[in-house]
Image (cartoon, helix red, strand yellow):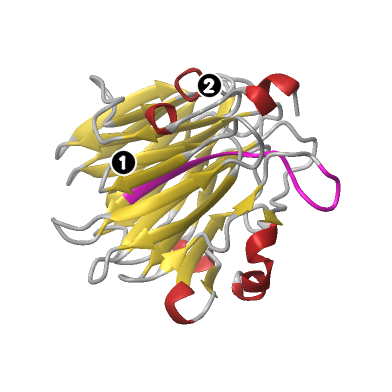
């Protein structure tokens, strides 16, 4: 990790991204490496009206098209090799993020992608700058590993649709977490901002939130792991995001009576695609229940 990253102070004004702050003509959320101030991770949310379409080029990044609500057709074209030419997937999708796991589509770098939805819907595009061009693929919902993690008021459900050991990508790691109302997740606080072989991997991370119920909210904490590190305490609502370039992140706290959803998008510069984390030493006794 560079000295510049270690001393670059990031505060809530930089790292908390409220709903609408990055909205544009094509996306309700549009966070790219330039906006985030890092090198790899991106997140977009596209909202389609019935019979709506959206086209984008993947550039130097790999992407997963993940339905948040509704279903769609995903078609990839262009580029050379990798099996991307003329590939089409029908995504059944879901009613909403709290309803169920969803199927998804992986689309490679250097391709043109069309998303079309007859009934309309909302679709997350989780991306990461990458080197290898892998083939376009379909991820069936029944094959998504679902994990119950933690216990008591730290219990939550993790949908490991693109975790490092569940689905092949070059750099991208992405999972969904459902935290019941009143519970804590992303706890104990942990970090992954240094490359320490066998112990910790350097990964940027985006948290994208949705809260069950029109008046629901939650809280997200990111605390410095070193002098001048990232420092965030944000009240989060549906459509908000928090950027985690470094530091201890957690807990994520759900308001009683309102379940919390977040999509985690991660990637980093390491040669191996791994998720290795270091727990906060002050909370290490709590780490036994983390997995």
* Snapshot quadrant of residue 79: top right
Q: For the C terminus, which image quadrant?
A: bottom right
**Callout 2: few (<14), some (14-19), or many (20+) C-alpha neighbours within 10 Å?**
some
Does 165 sit above or below residue 74? below
Q: Is residue 135 left or right of residue 53?
A: right
* Snapshot quadrant of residue 239: top left
Q: Is residue 134 left or right of residue 241?
A: right
Q: Residue at x 66, y 56 (%)?
A: 280
Q: Residue at x 23, y 61 (%)?
A: 212
Q: Which residue is mark 2?
A: 37
Q: Residue 219: x and y, percent?
A: 35, 53
202 is within the stretch colored magenta:
yes
Q: Residue 271: x and y, percent?
A: 80, 35
Q: Secondary structure at mark 2?
A: loop
Q: Residue 160: x and y, percent?
A: 55, 60
Q: Is residue 133 left or right of residue 220?
A: right
224 is within the stretch colored magenta:
no
Provide the residue span drawn in magenta: 196-209
Does residue 64 show up? no
**Callout 1: few (<14), some (14-19), or many (20+) C-alpha neighbours within 10 Å?**
many
| Disc ID at residue 240 | 1
Does 179 sit above or below residue 77? below
| Disc ID at residue 128 | none
Does residue 174 show up? yes
Q: Is residue 274 left or right of residue 262?
A: right
Given residues 29 and 131, the one toward you in this image is 29
User: Which numbered disc flags the more N-terminal residue, 1 or 2?
Assistant: 2
Q: Residue 107: x and y, percent?
A: 52, 35
CA gap, disc 1 to disc 2?
18 Å
């Amino acid at each position: 990790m560079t000295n510049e990253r270690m001393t670059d102070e990031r505060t809530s004004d930089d790292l908390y991204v409220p709903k609408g702050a990055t909205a544009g003509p094509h996306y309700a959320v549009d966070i790219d490496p330039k906006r985030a101030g890092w090198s790899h991770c991106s997140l977009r949310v596209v909202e389609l009206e019935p019979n709506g379409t959206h086209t984008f080029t993947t550039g130097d990044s790999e992407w997963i098209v993940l339905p948040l609500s509704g279903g769609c057709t995903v078609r990839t074209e262009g580029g050379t090799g990798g099996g991307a030419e003329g590939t089409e997937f029908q995504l059944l999708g879901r009613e909403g993020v709290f309803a169920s796991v969803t199927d998804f589509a992986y689309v490679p770098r250097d391709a043109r992608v069309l998303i079309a939805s007859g009934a309309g819907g909302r679709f997350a595009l989780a991306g990461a700058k990458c080197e290898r061009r892998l083939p376009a693929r379909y991820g069936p919902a029944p094959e998504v590993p679902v994990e119950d993690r933690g216990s008591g008021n730290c219990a939550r459900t993790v949908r490991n649709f693109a975790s490092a050991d569940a689905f092949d990508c070059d750099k991208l790691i992405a999972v969904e977490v459902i935290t019941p109302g009143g519970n804590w997740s992303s706890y104990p606080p942990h970090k992954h901002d240094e490359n320490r072989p066998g112990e910790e991997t350097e990964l940027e991370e985006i948290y994208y939130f949705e809260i069950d119920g029109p008046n629901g909210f939650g809280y997200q904490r990111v605390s410095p792991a070193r002098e001048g590190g990232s420092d965030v305490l944000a009240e989060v609502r549906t459509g908000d995001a928090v950027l985690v370039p470094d530091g201890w992140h957690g807990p994520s706290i759900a308001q009683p009576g309102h379940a919390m959803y977040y999509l985690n998008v991660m990637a980093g510069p390491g040669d191996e695609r791994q998720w290795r984390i270091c727990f906060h030493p002050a909370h290490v006794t709590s780490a036994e229940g983390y997995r």
